[in-house]
Image (tube, grey):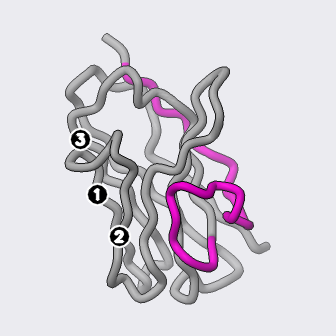
Amino acid sequence: QVQLVESGGGLVQPGGSLRLSCAASGFTLGGYAIGWIRQAPGKEREGVSCISSNNSTTYYADSVKGRFTISRDNAKNTVYLEMNSLKPEDTAVYYCATVMLCTVARVGLYDFWGQGTQVTVSS
């Protein structure tokens, strides 16, 4: 079965950290740029970060720059999002998805999505 599966979400206090994983099954992630997109209740989807297929370039939304780090391990067919100094406004469902060329501005270009993992930042 071809799918992307996100994991690692949960409840964390402000200032805390989480690491999200995006694991692919049924296909090889290595040929794709992969992004993380989030959607908070009542808000539009927001591109968070993206990593190119050859692992050479990363992109971040201004709102997470300096706090989040995207990486990939093609041998494990997995992409990660390390999230530090979390804020309540980071609360959202986080999705990973494939895209032809990395972008955090044009979420509509992402074409194959996982089911999402909930991240809640609250004291």
- Which structural element holds mark 2? strand
Q: Residue 11, how many percent across, how many down?
A: 41, 25
- The amino acid pointed to by label 1 is Thr
- Seen in the picture, residue 74 relative to 16 is either above or below; the reply is below
Spatial separation of the CA atoms under disc 1 and disc 2: 9 Å
Q: In terms of secondary structure, where does tag 3 sit?
A: loop
Residue that mark 3 sits on? 84
| Amino acid type, callout 2 | Thr
Name the quarter where the C terminus is drawn: top left
The boundaries of the magenta stretch are 99-121
Kindly give the residue lying farthest to the top in the view shown. 123
User: How many tags in the picture?
Assistant: 3
Q: Tell whether label 2 touches label 1 (CB within 8 Å).
A: yes
Q: Which mark sits nearer the N-terminus, 1 or 2?
A: 2
The local crowd at label 1, few if under 14, some if 14 to 19, many if 20 or more residues have their Cα within 10 Å, is: some
Residue 69 - label: 1
Q: Residue furthest right?
A: 1
Label 3 Cα crowd, 10 Å radius (few <14 / some 14-19 / many 20+): some
Please provide percent x and percent y for residue 46. 55, 43
* Residue 93 at x, y percent in the picture: 57, 36
User: Measuring 56% from the left and 53% from the top, which residue is drawn there?
Assistant: 6
Mark 3 or mark 1, earlier in chain:
1
Q: Residues within 10 Å of mark 2 (few under 14, many from 20)?
A: some
Give residue 38's quadrant in the image: top right
